[in-house]
Image (cartoon, grey):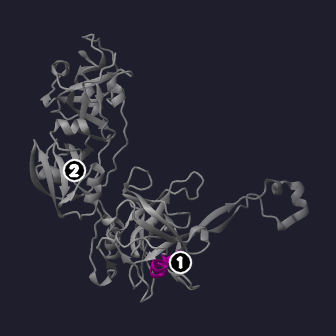
Amino acid sequence: MNMKLISKSMLGMLTVVAGAAVVLAVSHSTALAKEHEPKFTVSTTPINRDAGLGTSFASVVKKVAPSVVNIYSTRFIKERLVQNPMLSDPFFRQFFGNQMPPDGGDRERTRKEQSLGSGVIVSPDGYILTANHVIAGADEVKVSLPGSKTEYPAKIIGKDRATDVAVLKIEAKNLPSITLADSDQLEIGDVVLAIGNPFGIGQTVTKGIVSALGRSGLGFNGYEDFIQTDAAINPGNSGGALVDTDGRLVGINTAIISPSGGNNGIGFAVPINMARNILERLASGGTITRGYLGIIPQDLDAGLAQQFNLPGQNGALVGDVLPNTPAAKAGMKSGDVILSVNDKPVADAHGLQLTISQLLPGTPARLKIIRDGKTKTLTVKLGELPGSAIASNQNGNQDNTGSMADALDGVTVADLNPQIREQLRMPDDLQGAIVTQVDSDSNSADAGLQSNDVIVGIDRHPVTNADDAVQLCKAAKGDNILVKIWRRSGNFAGTRYLSVDNTKRQN
């Protein structure tokens, strides 16, 4: 095997990129039934931040508290009762006779397991928003209104585990429903109130501020865009209301970060815009399916922004476009930078995912992009996510049996051969240099370059073999090198870009 060693000074600090495909998702309703849709009220006016906070929020609480309900979920669990082994001993059986179960007489009983959470009435005819984990696995769900001992049996209209949102319905009329706000209007520092039933002690109100917006990567849900607040949220608050000082619902309380299980001032709520999207589809008889663009987006950093001549780091860089997908059919290309969707700015790859998730499959999405320094608009008809799951990152190691042709330091590369192509299930037309080894002390290793990555381009020049990779690295003179690689991650494979800091050397 023809092996080449690339100097670590040439492949310096590589910027880590997303290791797996980001599947863009959306909720979809299969059959709209207008007559059954909840008639909720929405107010999109920004909150009056010049009015002053005042000394009491009693008027706000009086307005919204009747809309926050208690939710009792029950599971019936069958378990086997195993008799005491001593009772099988003939010595003991002579004293109890036929009153004892026969040998092997294990019995089964049903145990009832109950949990308590909160919910929010969003329409006068009984639609209720709550957190999915409040009613997950429940065989029976009941709802009680504040100040009432009456319990209403609740029908689970639908639930979405990926966003931790569920919709319930009780048979009642003229209920005190809350007004939904536009959560996109929230700002860090806005005062919010959390209302729910913590620890089952009864309805409780806590006050705090919006500590952060757009929190993600916490591992709670598949789609995370949390409102973070320091308003006390404790067990039992899940599914309850987070409201602004105008008494409008801005979020559904869902999670806390707490080693002790109690409030530490870090609570999270699902934005009402996301929850409303789920509500509208489930209440109209639809099911939750996921939409699909068919790209691998990645975040921009300073190096990539410079390489693509961008004014800043906002946007999502298209690392790869999968063949025969909506994006490919619309003419999207690797290296495009998506700036907005339907005029809504895109901050990063995660923001792109969340924006697309609010759109229906089959609808057109207008994408503003930058390609080769020029701004243009593409219209993509969204598809529907295939049912197969994306596997986690699983990279094997190549057997480095070939000799090194050069005494360069840092990264060893080799020509592609039929065995490598078969092992990595590479496309027949893919050309490049396979990375067979990365020095653990090199800048490349620190930045995330991996064995089995295939270098397909350096500074926008194609790489067809190991010699190309070495020569292009030697010829690179700028402070940053743009490297394009192909990587397989489990069942998924595609290309992505790396921005290489070529000014930082290690000796």
Crowd rating for badge 1 (residues with CA inside 10 Å; few <14, some 14–19, many 20+): some
Q: Secondary structure at mark 2?
A: loop
Quarter of the image containing the C terminus?
Answer: top left
Residue at image x 27%, y 63%? 358
Query: In this picture, is 461 found above or below 147?
Result: above
Q: Is residue 236 magenta?
A: no
Q: Amino acid at mark 1?
A: Lys
Q: Closer to the camera, 70 or 86?
A: 70
Q: What residue did someone put label 2 on? A: 294
Query: In this picture, is 205 found above or below 37?
Result: above
- Is residue 286 visible in the rendered structure shown here? no
The location of residue 101, given as percent across then percent down, is 78, 64
- Residue extending farthest to the bottom is 174
Crowd rating for badge 2 (residues with CA inside 10 Å; few <14, some 14–19, many 20+): many
Residue at image x 44%, y 51%? 219
Q: Closer to the camera, 323 or 134?
A: 134
Task: Find residue 225 and report its image quarter.
Answer: bottom left
Q: Secondary structure at mark 1?
A: strand
Q: Amino acid at mark 2?
A: Gly
Query: In this picture, is 10 found above or below 84?
Result: above
The location of residue 295, given as percent across then percent down, is 22, 48
Quarter of the image containing the N terminus?
Answer: top left
In the image, 211: left or right of 411? right
Tag of residue 232: none
Tag of residue 142: 1
The location of residue 388, given as percent across then percent down, is 32, 51
Q: Which residues are magenta?
A: 57-70
Q: How many marks?
A: 2
